[in-house]
Image (tube, rainbow, N blue to C red):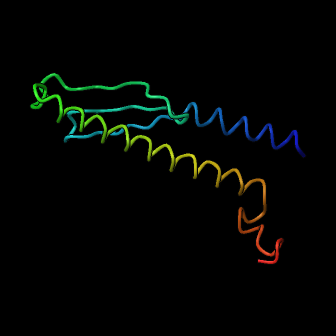
Amino acid sequence: MFDRLQQQQEEIRRALAAARVEAVSGDGWVTVRMSGDRKVTDISIREDHPLSGDLSALEDHLTLAVNDALEQVTLLEQETVREWMGKLLPGGMDGLKGIFGT
């Protein structure tokens, strides 16, 4: 059973590493791409960005896009684990109800 859990955990890790999310800020002026294992893979800033001379505003757009990408990855992780638990336990996490008197 333990070996199976380790195998499942590795499958989840690989699936997340292969997944990609994209977050856009400033009406498409700044784009951040991130892998499911929380690695930024690309940051794009359009050359015609109207705030390219305003470093503070550009930094704000980057911060917003990175934070949005991180939030998307968090949701992806939760969904991936929920699917995994559904396969592992009949009824997913609800299958644990009653085991500990709850």
How far across and down, in percent of the image, does residue 71 sit?
Answer: 44, 47
Residue at 70 percent of width and 50 percent of height? 84
Q: In this rendering, is residue 31 above or below 83? A: above
Furthest-right residue in this view:
1
Quarter of the C terminus within the rendering: bottom right
How far across and down, in percent of the image, does residue 63 sit?
Answer: 31, 38
How far across and down, in percent of the image, does residue 93 sit?
Answer: 71, 63
How far across and down, in percent of the image, does residue 11 sit?
Answer: 71, 36
Q: In this rendering, is residue 51 above or below 74? A: above
Furthest-front residue in this view:
56
Please state which of residues 66 and 93 is positioned toward the viewer in this rendering: 66
Residue 24 location, quadrant: top left
Residue at 40 percent of width and 40 percent of height? 69
Residue 85 location, quadrant: bottom right
Report whether 1 appears left or right of 63: right
Please state which of residues 26 and 101 is positioned toward the viewer in this rendering: 101
Q: In this rendering, is residue 51 above or below 89? A: above
Residue at 51 percent of width and 34 percent of height? 38
Residue 16 location, quadrant: top right
Furthest-top residue in this view:
47
Please state which of residues 12 and 102 is positioned toward the viewer in this rendering: 102
Residue at 51 percent of width and 47 percent of height? 74
